[in-house]
Image (cartoon, rainbow, N blue to C red):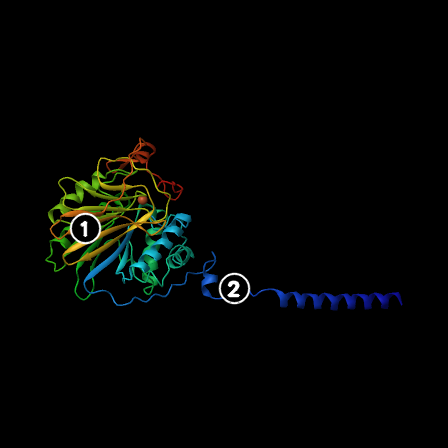
Amino acid sequence: MRISLNIEGVRRLYFFLLSLALLCSACTPPKPSGSLAAATKPASKPVVAQWTPRAYPTDQVNFIAMGDWGSGGQEQKDVAKALATYVDGTGIQFNGLLTLGDNFYVQLKDVEDYQFQSLFEDMFDARRLNFPFYVTLGNHDYEKDKAKIELAYAAKHPDSRWKFPSQWYRLDLPEDKPLVTVLMLNSNKPRMTSEQWDEQIKWIDEQLSQPRATKWTIACAHHPLFSNGAHGDNGVLQVQWGPIFKKHKLDFYLCGHDHDMQQLQVPNWSTTFVLAGGGGKKPTKMRRDIRGPFSKSMNGFSHLQLFEDRAIVHFVNGADAKVVHEIQRTRDGEVSTLVKGMSDKATTQPLKVLLGIDLDEKKEGPKDPAKTPASPED
Ligand SMILES: [Fe+2]
């Protein structure tokens, strides 16, 4: 009798718990589904964002130039948001974004790393930023095998906005009747073999020596030749690339590396130097103020708008998408300021490098990038 009562009790308890479980499962909200939600988890493979460009304007070419962005931090999120707002506000179909290196500060395990999605595919709104991102490499892109992985991602996903055919390459845009020639270069000399470095120099000279129908010539790379910022000038690039740029009257040199925004006109140089390294790290303080006309510690990006007879460069604040400085350059190299940005005063902090030689590396010997965490100022 006692036993049968216990069995009955257990049976009732079982049915009570079963009913409770069914009731609770009906009340639980459904888990998010869909590939995007799943793909931003570390164990998932990246999913390429769909993008569809509208018709490109026929009288102009528009680029965003931005470096030093792949941090995944709040600065990157804020700049990515401002970038989408700014581009959308212009109403123009842009031809592309020229990355100026330091595309990923985080480590990438391989070509399937989900951070291609969280820091790139999802970070940059594919509806409003519906154009190719043409890639160059920064020093941080050489940590572990990131350079190879970034090249492999472009090869594996030809439908992604991520375009990176080789370590250095040339763009002539727009495709039908090109107005602009852009050389996308690798300035990471210490990470390249001397043969690669020499081969690239020969290639730059060959490309710029060829007859061209395009009206504008631009070179993009990570490291500046001249900078008022934390890393200062790079004497190696001035000596090894400078004479070629001068010989061929390069119109613009675009770079990053310092986390600030600059437009420099340098005596005895016809080139306009644009530094746009404010893409996603904490801005670094300026070390010089003797050159200009514009150098400011800030997050942001540049917009190059190239017409047949003139080019306009807009320097845009990464916090609110507002233009802070704007210049015009005519085809014969006359530069005028349309909106005058306020430059920063120099600080007394020492430079991080001296004429292209990293003082820390010289003191301590070459760093093992695999073991060295990214400095917040790099
Ligand atoms: Fe850098």
Q: Residue at x 45, y 58 (%)?
A: 40
Q: Nearer the viewer, residue 248 or 156?
A: 248
* Number of marks drawn: 2
Kind of residue sitting beneath label 1: Gln
Disc 1, SS = strand
Residue 184 position, x and y percent, is 23, 53
Q: Nearer the viewer, residue 305 or 340?
A: 340
Residue 139 position, x and y percent, is 31, 45
Q: Nearer the viewer, residue 38 or 338?
A: 338
* Residue ID for mark 1: 328
Ligand number 1: quarter of image:
top left
Question: Which mark sits nearer the N-terminus, 2 or 1?
Answer: 2
Q: Residue at x 33, y 53 (%)?
A: 148
Label ID, residue 32: 2
Q: Is residue 148 visible?
A: yes
Instruction: Judge from the rendering whether residue 115 lies leftward or rightward of residue 171; answer left or right.
Output: right
Asked if residue 43 is positioned above or below residue 336 in the image, the reply reads: below
Q: Is residue 101 visible?
A: no
